[in-house]
Amino acid sequence: MASFKSLCEEYFGTNDLYEVLGIERTASNKEIKKAYHKLSLLVHPDRVDESQKTVATEKFKVLGKIHSVLQDKDKRKCYDDCGEIDEENDSSFNWMEYWRAIFKKIDIKDIENYEKEYIGSDVELRDIKKAYVGTKGNMDLVLEMVPFSNCDSEPRIQEIVRNMIDNGEVEEYPGFFNESKQKKTRRRNKWEEEKKVAEMIDRRALEQEIEMNKEKRLKGFADLIANIESKYGGNAKRKSLTNGPKSTPKRSAKKSKK
């Protein structure tokens, strides 16, 4: 089983817990929580493409563990003094529930707002640089590692990396800029297929929600009728909500006696 520090190194390029969160060692609990929240939004398993879900889930677990260490006074002191982290088996721990207990429930609007804030930021540039260097210019892996990126992001990411190369920040990996047409096509086809699946899942979820709301409205209307009847109508019979009013048969006129 890989050590926790090796997992930090694998998924974030460093085994220093403070560096993973991008904070100083003197950071307050509030700053730790804020950094954890921002990073966890980027890799939240429910908010990434299907192709990124496995890696995102592992990153999400690592971030949860880091927060649990640094927000605990005794665990943090042990880490600061000796660099030690409790290596107990957390495989069965529910880090999603841990996250939900700390933060409010997020919706799609929260993610969209953060996406706007993230794209073009220093944080994104750092992530692109780390992904490019760490994968030696493997575009497939870069797109998996950089949040909110997909096949449509490739030209922009390549331009960013080209600027880094020109500035002497990173070395050039020719394969990053000279991929075969077949490889690009294969990656895009995979992305398009995953996109269709995701849209289908979203559509089904929406249909289920509409149906549930419909049932709630019908129940609410039925309850309203029942309340009105109990207050004003005595034992009056309710008309069906689905059938129209039944026509009352006409009485035959009685002949008057002479």
Image: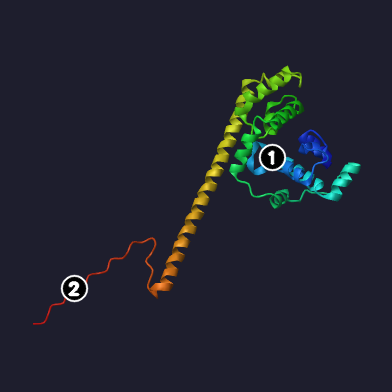
**Would residue 2 be visible to someone looking at this image?**
no
Q: Residue at x 39, y 73 (%)?
A: 232
- Local packing at callout 1 (Cα closer than 10 Å; few below 14, some 14-19, many 20+) is many
Q: Is residue 213 above or below residue 78?
A: below
From the top left corner, tell me how far across and down residue 1 is, in percent: 83, 42
Foreground: 58 or 70?
Answer: 70
Per the image, label 2 sits on a secondary structure element best described as loop
Residue 154 vertical position relative to residue 8 in the rendered view, above or below = above
Query: x%, y% of residue 35?
Result: 73, 41
Q: Which residue corresponds to mark 2?
A: 252
| Mark 1 touches mark 2? (CB < 8 Å) | no
Direction from residue 12 to residue 185 in the image, left or right: left
251 or 106, which lies in front?
106
Residue 43 numbered tag: 1
Q: Residue furthest left?
A: 258
Q: Residue 30: which disc? A: none
Which secondary structure, mark 1? loop
Quarter of the rendering containing residue 228 = bottom left
State left or right for residue 85 relative to residue 106: right
Does 248 appear above or below 163? Answer: below
**Which residue appears at 28% of the width and 66% of the height?**
247
